[in-house]
Amino acid sequence: MLVVTSTALFLSVLIWFNYSAVLPQVVDAWGLSGMQAGLVFGAFQVGYLVAIVPAGWLADRYSPRWVIAVGATGTAVPSLAFAVFADGVFLATVLRFCSGLFVAGVYVPGMRFLSDWFPERIRGRALGIYIGTFELGSGLSFVFATAALEVMNWRLAIAATSVGALFVAPLVLASTRDAPDRTHDHRTGFDWALLRNRTYLAAIGIYAWHNWELFGVRSWLLAFLVATPAFVVSDSTLGPGLVVGAMIIAGGVGNVAGGWFSDRIGRPQILAIGLGSSTVLSAVFGLLDNLPTAVLVAVTLVYGLVLALDSAPTSTLVTEVVPDEAVGSALSVQSLVGFSTTIVSPVVFGLALDRGGYAIAFPTLALGALFGLAFVGILSWDVSQQSD
């Protein structure tokens, strides 16, 4: 169940960042302004946010397997249409919005499906591997598309990273089944009682500020590396693009490690270690532009690992503090709030960059991680009170 569900996520997530990887070529081909290029990128995020709560509710009420199958297919078809037919900002925005809309039916329903199969004592490891697959697919999306651009045009690069999602539906429907003791949510609406659960709300706060930092880094890391002396001598973005991809893949390792350690020593402890480490690195990363290439790459990979340490423990914690029949809805609200911050933090980073350079911009991400640590404190207090 874990292997098949993770494979389904991997094939679907290759689509998430393939536009970002070919963005310079698309801008040149269509003569896009910065605002137009950002609109196409943001459309995918908006589609995801619009659909994520309904997707979680569907996974609670019906079989998550079917939600995943429909979601993956609906993600692939508009992305392939983008590769073949998109010729400007309007159609590109519509197609990316549709892909984002349907990918919501893959990520959270997959977590709901796995939480049905794995008991709490090993659930952190299982979700760590699953969420790590998201990081692996995101990173390899950059790597595959960037490498493909060296031998083919951007349309073929988009198509090559989109076609795999078409195979998800037959794979999932033929190879998996629902857990025999799965609980269904028979209510017709959203369970508003979730919003009175303090521990759950603290977990949402942690996840939101985690994403503030994580996606701020991923949005701007390529631009930072291209401007460093280590890479500025090269006319190609292949080297920095591969480093960004490797850094995101390192995040997959961080997810697996975070989930595994949280099963052994506790969720709040790993959350504090992850956010504390990333706070320090975000605070100083903008000052490291003059490091030798090998050292800069090594620090970047460590940065990617610690940025992801807290992701799997947070999502696992959510599945443990809400009723079983509402896990999908709870995870979807967590994702909705968490991904909302990804729209804001890159803009705040850019404003700080304009005023003081990268040395000022990266600390705006560290500030977000500090807020995340504050929510870890609230969560730890609630957990200790409940144990008493």
Image: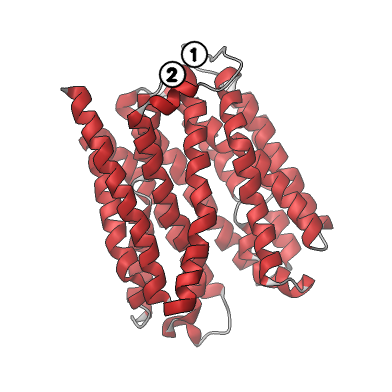
SS label for mark 1: loop
Q: Which of marks 2 and 1 is nearer the N terminus?
A: 1
Q: Label 1 near label 2: C-beta < 8 Å?
A: yes
Which quadrant of the structure image shows residue 106?
Answer: top right
Few, some or many residues within 10 Å of mark 2 (<14, 14–19, 20+): some
The answer to which of 57 and 67 lies nearer the viewer is: 57
Q: Considering only vertical position in the picture, is 346 above or below 180?
A: below
Q: Where in the figure is residue 46, as x and y percent of width and height?
A: 63, 48
Q: Is residue 35 left or right of residue 230?
A: right
Residue type pointed to by label 1: Thr
Q: Where in the figure is residue 19, as x and y percent of width and height?
A: 66, 60
The answer to which of 123 and 149 lies nearer the viewer is: 123
Residue placed farthest to the bottom in the image? 233
Identify the residue under disc 1.
183
Distance Cα–Cα, label 2 vs label 1? 7 Å
Residue type pointed to by label 2: Asp
SS label for mark 2: helix
Q: Considering only vertical position in the picture, is 33 above or below 268?
A: below
Q: Where in the figure is residue 263, as x and y percent of width and height?
A: 27, 33
Identify the residue under disc 2.
324
Q: Which residue is found at the position 63% from the left and 40% from the top?
A: 50
Q: Considering only vertical position in the picture, is 382 above or below 356?
A: above
Few, some or many residues within 10 Å of mark 1 (<14, 14–19, 20+): some
